[in-house]
Image: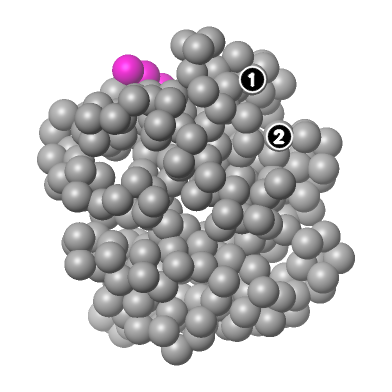
Amino acid sequence: MSTTPAIIDTHCHLDFAVFDEDRDQVLNRCAINNVQTIINPGVTADTWQRTINLSQSTPTLHFALGLHPQFIEHHQPQHLSQLDTLIETHRPVAVGEIGLDFYAAQRPQSNTGGKNPESSTQANREKQQLFFVKQLIIAKQHNLPVIIHNRKAHDLCLNLLSDTVVAGGTIHAFNGSIQQAHKYHEMGFMLGFGGMLTYERSSKLRALVKQLPLSAIVLETDAPDMTVSAHQGERNSPEYLPFVLAAVAEIKNLSVEQVAEVTSQNAQRIFNLT
Ligand SMILES: [Zn+2]
C-alpha cells in the first residue's frame, strides 16, 4: 500500500500498553502506509503524562487530553483542575476523549452488589454528564476543539453542545442518524468513521457515509479497538487506516486520492495542524 496518499488517523490510542512491545515498528509501518499524522486522545488523569511524553517523542503523533466516559468511576473533581493546568502548560490539539456512554452505563455495575442497579445507572449517567459539561467548558475557555465519544446519547449530546459552544471537533466512531450527523456538522463537527466501515454487514454506517458530504468526514482507526475486516480478531493498528480510506472511496465512488486529500484537510482544519 505504499502508493496510498497521506492520511490522518484522527483517533488512535497508541499510548495504550498493548503497543508497548512494538510501538516503533507500528510507527514504521504507518510511515510506509503514509499514515502521516495520528491524533492520540488521553483517557484518564493517571495516564495523561504518558500520553504527553509519547507524543513529545514522536513527531507524527499529536495528543489530546480528556476524561473518557467509560472510565467514569476513576474520575475525580480534582482531575478537572489538573486538566486545565496541563492544557495551559502543554497545549494539546483538543480536549478528549470526552462524552457520554449510556451503553456502558446500562451494564451491570460490579460495585453495586446487585442492589439498586437503576439508581446506579442514573448516578453513573449524571456523573458522566457532569464531567462532560465541565470539560466542554474547559475546551471553550482554551478555545480548543473536542474529541467526543458518544453511545446512545446523541440527542442529549447535541443539546449540551448547543449550551456550551466549543471550537468544533470530531464525533468519534459516529453511529447515529443522518439527521444527527447533519446537526453535528452544522455545529462545526466532523464525523469520524473507522474499521467498522470495512465490513459489508455495516449497512447503516455505509449508508451514512454515502449520504454525508466528504467535507463532514474524517478517518480514524480507534486502535487498538474496532479492527478492519482484513485483520479481524487481531489488535487494531493505525497502520490499517488505508483500509478505511479505501472503504470510504468505494462507498462514495470517489478516488482514494480525493478522499485522502479532503479528509486530511478536514482533520487539519479541525485540529489546527500545520
Ligand atoms: Zn477512543
Q: Alpha-carbon neighbours of circle 1 within 10 Å: few (<14), some, or many (≥20)? A: some
Is residue 48 toward the left or the right of residue 253 in the image?
A: right
- Chain part drawn in magenta: 230-234
**Residue at the image position 51 percent from the left and 23 percent from the top:** 5
Amino acid marked by disc 2: Thr
Q: Where is residue 124 drawn, in percent x and y?
A: 41, 77
Q: Alpha-carbon neighbours of circle 2 within 10 Å: few (<14), some, or many (≥20)? A: some
Q: Dot 1 lies on which element?
A: helix
Amino acid marked by disc 1: Ala
Q: Dot 2 lies on which element?
A: loop
Residue beneath label 2, please?
60
Q: Mark 1 and 2 residues: CB-CB less than 8 Å, in contact?
A: yes
Q: Where is residue 152 drawn, in percent x and y?
A: 26, 66
**Residue at the image position 37 percent from the left and 64 percent from the top:** 185
Is residue 178 something one can see in this rendering? Answer: yes
Q: Is residue 233 magenta?
A: yes
Q: Residue furthest right?
A: 89
Is residue 10 toward the left or the right of residue 120 in the image?
A: right
Q: Where is residue 22 drawn, in percent x and y?
A: 66, 20
Q: Where is residue 118 drawn, in percent x and y?
A: 26, 80
Q: Could you give the CA–CA distance between mark 1 and mark 2, rounded to whole angstroms?
A: 9 Å
Q: Is residue 126 above or below residue 28?
A: below
Based on the displayed image, in which of its 4 quarters is residue 59 positioned? top right
Q: Residue furthest top?
A: 2
Name which of mark 1 and mark 2 comes first in the sequence: 1
Nearer the observer, 66 or 102 = 66
Residue 31 numbered tag:
1
